[in-house]
Amino acid sequence: MNLNCASGHKKRRLEFPSKDEKTQILSVTTQDEDTITDLKKRLDKSEEENEQLDGKIETTNDLLKKIEERCKEITKENEILREKNEKSLEQLQQTESEIKVLKSESEEARRIQETKAIEVESSQQTINTLEKKVEGLQGEKENTIRSLQDELNVLKQRLKKEQEDATRDVKELKNEKQLAIDHYTQQVQSRDNEIQRLHGQIRQLSENNAQNEKFCRQQQEELQSFKSELERKENTLQTVVKQRDEERTLKEDERKQKDEALTRLSAIAGDRLRNNNPGITDLSDPNRPMKIAEKFTEMYDNDWTDSMEALEDLDLGEGECVKILLHFLTDSYEECGRLVAELDSHILKAVIISTCEQDTNESGDNKPQDQNIPAELLKPMKDLRKKLTENNVEKLQKKLPDYLMKARDLTEEHITACSKFVADCIKYAWMMQIQDPPVYIEWDFPSDTKIDTNILRSYTKAGDHVDFIVWPVLYLHKDGPVLNKGVVQPKSANK
């Protein structure tokens, strides 16, 4: 029975852009693209002007480098000429010193000549004195006169020889002096000519240096002017680039907002399309139905066989062991379904305000109706629950074994013997129930029911009718396609 409240409650609906709004969005996008194209053209033009300015700057820098290299060469040549001039002056000073030495030697030779002359004059006076003595001693002994005469002759010969030697030495000294004077005079004249030539070159180089310095100043002034112009253009270009970047940022923000709006619209449409639609599979989900079907088959081939052997070790018959293992799986599946429904009820109650104290659906149960909740809100909740699978499974594997023992009046010994199988039953039962829609298993095949080979296969015997169910059929969803066939033990033909 439905209970109505005193006043109605208006339900909110999500509003989506109309066709006119979408057309306006596309028009604004076209205008933005035209503006971006115009900005790109302006940017390309600015980049071309910048490249031309870079070329002019490189040319001017090359010219300035050549001028600086020429100035360095001129300075180097000036240094070389200055060094040569200094060497010439040093050589001239050395020549003057040598001339002074020669003059000193000439004076010394003149003094020697005067000394010789004085000695000759003294010798002459001595001869004269001796002649006077000879005249005064004419009356002395003949031997003394001859001795004195011999001595006088010897003195005369020696005096003559000394006079000749002195005359020859004076002539040689005069000749050497004259030759040295002539030689050094020529050297001095040559040095003077070289000095005059160097002075002329220095004057020429000074004039050239002045012209080069003037040219350098002019080039530096032109370069400074060019740099100022370049800085002005760079500032202008930076302003244009900044404006372009701001416009680009603005357009990028608008584009991002548009993309986000389109992404939200696509996500909403995708969520609506995938919600409760098993025909669309999320291939990025490692726990999608096809993967669960593969694990379900592996569990039967491996864990089920090991558990059968473990239960048989407890002195249980084959039929009883099969029934216990089937109950572990089906009871886990039903309990996980109940828990999922309970969680869905809590979630819906948390996000929807009831129109009365208690809502009931058409079937008469207390499960809240979710048909008015948008798919884009339900889908993220279901996806979040899938992401928390590992955490929830760990808690269920601790909680459900007690429930399984109480439900079938089993002991902990049974659970321990099949611990791996029980844990996998709980795990895959939970994964099946949280699919959207849930993966469905069917195990209600009464005895004597005819075996449908499209969904069932035989266990260890052959036959056409069911004796007991061994392993359930796995469907993509209720009334959906078969993922894995079930296993039944047929009745023997002779029964």
Image (cartoon, rainbow, N blue to C red):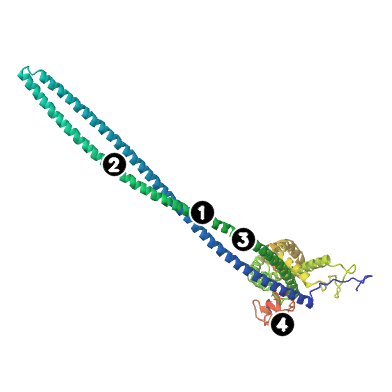
Q: Which residue is mark 1?
A: 213
Q: State which mark lies toward you, 4 or 1.
A: 1
Image coords of residue 58 (percent x, y): 54, 62
Contact (Cβ within 8 Å) of mark 2 with mark 3: no
| Amino acid type, label 1 | Glu
Q: CA distance from mark 3 to mark 4?
A: 99 Å
Residue for point 61% across, 61% down:
229
Image coords of residue 57 (percent x, y): 56, 62
Contact (Cβ within 8 Å) of mark 3 with mark 4: no
Name which quarter of the figure residue 334 lies in.
bottom right
Q: CA distance from mark 2 to mark 4?
A: 152 Å
Nearest the camera: 470 or 350? Answer: 350
Q: Which residue is mark 4?
A: 450
Does the rendering let one see residue 222?
yes
Q: Which residue is mark 2?
A: 181
| Amino acid type, label 3 | Glu
Q: Which residue is mark 3?
A: 229
Image coords of residue 70 (percent x, y): 47, 56
